[in-house]
Image: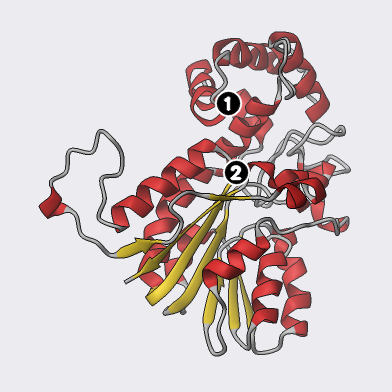
Amino acid sequence: MPSNSSDSQSSPIRKASFGHEPVLLGEVLKAIAPKDGGVYLDCTFGGGGHARAILNSANCKVVAIDRDPAAAERAKAFEAEFPGRFQFFAGEFSKLNELNCGGYAGILMDLGVSSFQLDEIGRGFSFRGAGPIDMRMDFSKGQTALEFIESSPLETLEKAIREYGEEPRYKKAARALKDAASAGALKTTLDLASVLEKALPKKIGSKIHPATLVFQALRIAVNDELGQAEEALPKAFERLSKGGVLAVITFHSLEDRLVKRFFKKMAGRPVDNNDSSSVQDRVKLAEILTRKPLTASAEEISQNPRSRSAKLRALMKI
């Protein structure tokens, strides 16, 4: 059993937040352009903001996936509100090929953590309050972030913080976490943030808390977020109809780099400056619709600060 399973805050479904704001909504709708009779796949249902907008834009159908049990609870209301037009599957979007669906006119992936997950202290994604050190998107299985810290060799923890958090002081951070865990000093997310704040003093001029990048790294590691996205992208592209659009929203450079490389490969372009593949080996299967990633407007950022780091890329299968 997870070490935090007895915590009084470990039932995220019991308290719902209604502050969810889908990011880049107008840009997503423009890219996907929902049409009557079309079937669209929302790979990351979350709070359902994007799915609702697609359903309201045309007489179409939306199939949605999410591994978060709390999202499955929210989806029940959608099924009642849009009878025959909405279908939800609980599970990882990397397994989308197992759905008995295909020929999608559009597919959306909104990567990263949702507003619901961030706002519910009991999920442990943020340090705005004293929550369990959990961070699992599917809180019914897998290691918690605390268990990952406790069970991982120091080198594994260092690698996760370096690669997933891009924290230059990864050695100090990893050592501080291992020492604190060994001493039994990590009980809540506030403890975790405090340990990191002492180990990684805030840099002059920095606007982010010293724990931010490490929290990101732990979350990505616990949920295998990059592995999930890397596995899902080719499966999603395969399930698109000809002329179908794949739109992906990312929130940090690791995700965006992964998506950018995949899109270039599908468009028959070199994936980066080090791509040594020959022109003959490249096959153009898609048109990239976004020359540069689309970002939130100043107005959207003022209304929803979390959209500040969001980037949207889209391509069309040919």
Q: Quadrant of the C terminus?
A: bottom left
The quadrant holding residue 59 is bottom right
Residue at coordinates 20% horizontally, 59% vertically from top-left?
283
- Mark 2 neighbour class, 10 Å CA radius: few under 14, some 14 to 19, many 20 or more: some
Q: Residue 19: x and y, percent?
A: 84, 55
Near-viewer residue (300 or 285): 300
Callout 1: SS:
helix
Q: Quadrant of the N terminus?
A: top right
Sooner in the amino-acid sequence: mark 1 or mark 2: 1
Q: Is residue 286 left or right of residue 44?
A: left
Residue at coordinates 55% horizontally, 24% vertically from top-left?
161
Report the Cα–Cα distance between label 1 and label 2.
Answer: 28 Å
Disc number at residue 151?
1
Q: Nearer the viewer, mark 1 or mark 2?
A: 2
Q: Residue 183: x and y, percent?
A: 74, 12
Callout 2: SS:
loop
- Mark 1 neighbour class, 10 Å CA radius: few under 14, some 14 to 19, many 20 or more: some
The amino acid sitting under disc 2 is: Phe
Can the viewer see residue 188? no
The amino acid sitting under disc 1 is: Ser
Q: Is residue 59 left or right of residue 260?
A: right
Can the viewer see residue 149? yes
Query: Residue at label 2?
Result: 251
User: Is 160 above or below relative to 108?
Assistant: above
Residue at coordinates 25% horizontally, 55% vertically from top-left?
268
Residue at coordinates 79% horizontally, 57% vertically from top-left?
20
Q: Residue 243: x and y, percent?
A: 39, 76
